[in-house]
Amino acid sequence: MTDTNPTVLVLGGTGRTGSRVAARLVARGLSVRLGSRSAEIPFDWADRSTWPAVVAGVDAVYLSYQPDLAVPGAVEVVESFTRLAVASGVRRVVLLSGRGEPEAERAEKAVRHAVEAAGGRWTVVRASWFQQNFSEGPFVDGLREGTLFLPVDAVREPFVDADDIADVAVAALLDDGHAGEVYEVTGPRLLTFAEAVAEIAAATGRPVSFVPVTIEEYVGALRDAGVPADMVSLLTYLFTEVLDGRNESLTDGVRRALGRAPQDLADHARAAAAAGAWAA
């Protein structure tokens, strides 16, 4: 950026990638505005009256839509927000997108067109399953109890480290050379969920098992546990449609953006275990 003291808005600033992006920007001395309902300037995707204040005076945006770009209505909401942002002076947008999700690609196109029409710069970071889903997200309770039940069997996934996503996003927000790039980011290996759980078991030094179940059994368990309906719907979509083998390939997105290899799940598992992520 040419501005010596730019302000960066980080949407989803308390989430798994947003919190990491914000921390990196603060460490580099930038002015960071968190986009969340509890922030100093409140932001809510569902309340458009909160949008103008949060983009006022902002130079760049890390755009992470919650809960996911695949949910109904997400494309129109993201496009409307982007148009408002660039009309308010935002000149750089980095969008976190979903790998292998047609709805997410529609959102990418909407963001690109809105930013380009205003003469700005955009970058897309496409990711699928985070390594942190095991240590910070929806799978952590099952792993702490010793058994992870999921409606998936032999499909392999290139689990990506959220820290790698954050590093790519920060580079795109601050450094030249990333405009117009679509970085599809993966980890360095393809693993089944059973193999991923085995890595976690090795890191924790205690038995942890993976048990495949039907989608009906999984949805029933989520509902019994009081998981919100929109999250149940999203997880059902991800397990029944996206997790069909379409993402069984590795990419060079992390290396293209950062000049280094992506972090391996085994390394993340050891660090998370040492930090007590799966302590009973």
Image (tube, grey):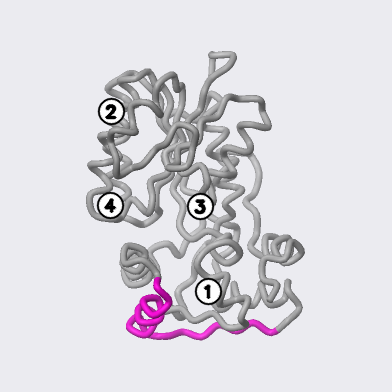
Residue type at mark 4: give it: Glu
Q: Which residues are magenta?
A: 207-226
Apparent side of residue 277 relative to residue 86 in the rendered image (left or right): right
Q: Single out the mark in the foreground, 3 or 1.
A: 1
Q: Secondary structure at mark 4?
A: helix
Instruction: Tell me which label, 1 or 4, sits earlier in the chain.
Output: 4
Apparent side of residue 49 relative to residue 262 in the rendered image (left or right): left
Q: Secondary structure at mark 2?
A: helix
Q: Is residue 82 above or below residue 246?
A: above
Q: Which residue is tagged 3? A: 251
Crowding at mark 3 (Cα within 10 Å: few <14, some 14-19, many 20+): some
Give residue 59's position: percent from left, percent from top.
Answer: 46, 21
Q: How far apart, in angstroms, are the residues tagged by discs 1 and 4?
A: 25 Å
Q: Is residue 276 above or below residue 48?
A: below
| Residue 83 badge | 2
Q: How far apart, in angstroms, are the residues tagged by discs 3 and 1?
A: 17 Å
Q: Single out the mark in the foreground, 1 or 2.
A: 2
Residue type at mark 1: give it: Thr
Q: Single out the mark in the foreground, 4 or 2.
A: 2
Q: How far apart, in angstroms, are the residues tagged by discs 3 and 2?
A: 31 Å
| Residue 192 badge | 1
